[in-house]
Image (cartoon, rainbow, N blue to C red):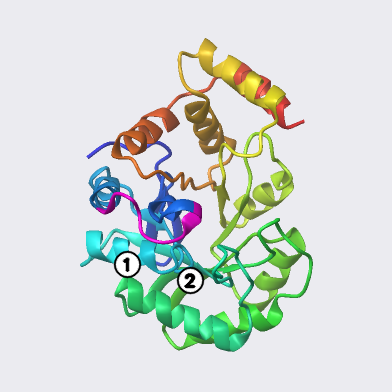
Amino acid sequence: MTELPGGTWNLGDDLTVTRFGYGAMQLAGPWVMGPPADRAGALAVLREAVALGITHIDTSDAYGPYVTNELIREALAPYPTALHVVTKVGARRDADGGWPTARDPESLRRQVDENLEHLGVDVLDVVNLRLGDAGGPVAGPVAEAFETLVELQRQGLIRHLGVSNATAEQVAEARSIAPIVCVQNLYNLANRQDDELIDALAEDGIAYVPFFPLGGFSPLQSEALSAVATRLGSTPMSVALAWLLQRSPNILLIPGTSSVAHLRENVAGAGLVLSADDVAELDKIGR
C-alpha cells in the first residue's frame, strides 16, 4: 500500500478519509454517458485506488447515468470498512447528454433511493446537493431541497450532507439548516474565487473538495504552470495537485482517470513538495 500524500481528514463521527481521493466521473463513456469502452479497465482502476489506500471515492448516479455507481458496486462490494463513497443528487441526464436540474423533493428522494440501490448500500456516507447548473453556481434559495435531504438523513438513509457548485451564500444557508461536512466547487490555481470560503471552512473544520484541478487555464496560465513544472522536473498536473494539497489542510482531492497508470502518476505527483518560492510563483497564476 502506497503512503498517500496529504494524510487524512475527518469528515465526522468515524468517517475519516484520505485527502487524496478518487473521482469516478471519467469511468462512464464519452461525455459521461453510457458504458466505458474498456469495462475491465474501469473496474481495474477502482480496485487499484483501494489497493493504493484511497478511502474517498466521489461519484453520482447521474454519471452514465447509473453506470459509474454500478461499476463501483461490481468492483468493490462488499466495501472495505475504511472506504467511503460520496455521491451527489440534484441533477439528472437527458437524451442529449445535458444535466437538467432535479431538486424538487420527489426527485431528490428518488435519486437517493437510486444511489442506494446502484451502490448496493443501506446508507449513503455523504450526499452532496448539487446546485447551480452546468455553467457554475447560480444564486438562489436552497432551503426546500436541502431540507428534503435533512429529512432523509433523519430517516437514516444519509450519514452526512454537503453542497456542490454552490455560492458562499448558499453554503451559509445550508449550514443554517443543518451541519455540512464538505463543499465541492470548481477551484484550482487559475480559478481562485473561493479563496475566502476555503479559509472560512477550514476554521470550522469543514472540507473543501475542488473539481477540475487542472481545468479552465488560459494559454498564458498554462505556460506559467508548465514552466514551474519543468523547473521542478515534474508535470503540470503534479504541480497543480501538490499546490492544492499545500493550499489548505481541509482541501480533499478527487482527480479522475480511467487509467491505472495515470492514477498511480497522480498519487505520486501530488506528493511533490513545493517550496515557499514555488508557491509564491504559482500564486501569481490566479491573480
Residue 70 tag number: 1
Q: In the displayed structure, would residue 146 be above or below residue 97?
A: below
What residue appears at the point 55 percent right and 62 percent down from the top-left corner?
Answer: 97
Q: Amino acid at mark 1?
A: Glu
Residue 254: say if magenta. no
Which residue is drawn at the image coordinates 29% and 39% (left, top)?
A: 260
The residue at 29%/49% (across/down) is: 38
Q: Where does the image place residue 272, in percent across and percent down from the top left? A: 44, 25
Say what secondary structure mark 1 lies in: helix
Picture quadrant of residue 220:
top right
Spot occupied by residue 126 in the image (x, y as percentages of width and height): 46, 68
Q: Is residue 19 above or below residue 76?
A: above
Residue 109, numbered circle: none
- Whether residue 7 appears in this view of the structure is yes
- How far across and how far down the image is residue 67, in percent? 37, 64
Q: Looking at this view, is 232 or 100 the one in front? A: 100
- Along the line of sight, which residue is nearer the eye, 145 or 60? 60
**To which residue does mark 2 refer?**
160
- Residue bounds of the magenta highlight: 31-39
**Left or right: residue 245 compared with residue 115:** right
- Residue at the far top: name it: 231
Q: Are marks 2 and 1 in contact (CB under 8 Å)?
A: no
Is tag 2's residue or tag 1's residue first in the polypeptide sequence?
1
Q: Amino acid at mark 2?
A: His
- Residue 11, how many percent across, how many down? 46, 60
> Residue at the spot x=58%, y=41% of the render?
248
Quarter of the image for the C terminus: give it: top right
Q: Is residue 95 left or right of residue 260?
A: right
Check disc 1: other Cα within 10 Å, few if <14, some if 14-19, many if 20+.
Answer: some
State the SS at label 2.
strand
Q: Nearer the viewer, residue 14 or 127?
A: 127
| Spatial separation of the CA atoms under disc 2 and disc 1 | 22 Å
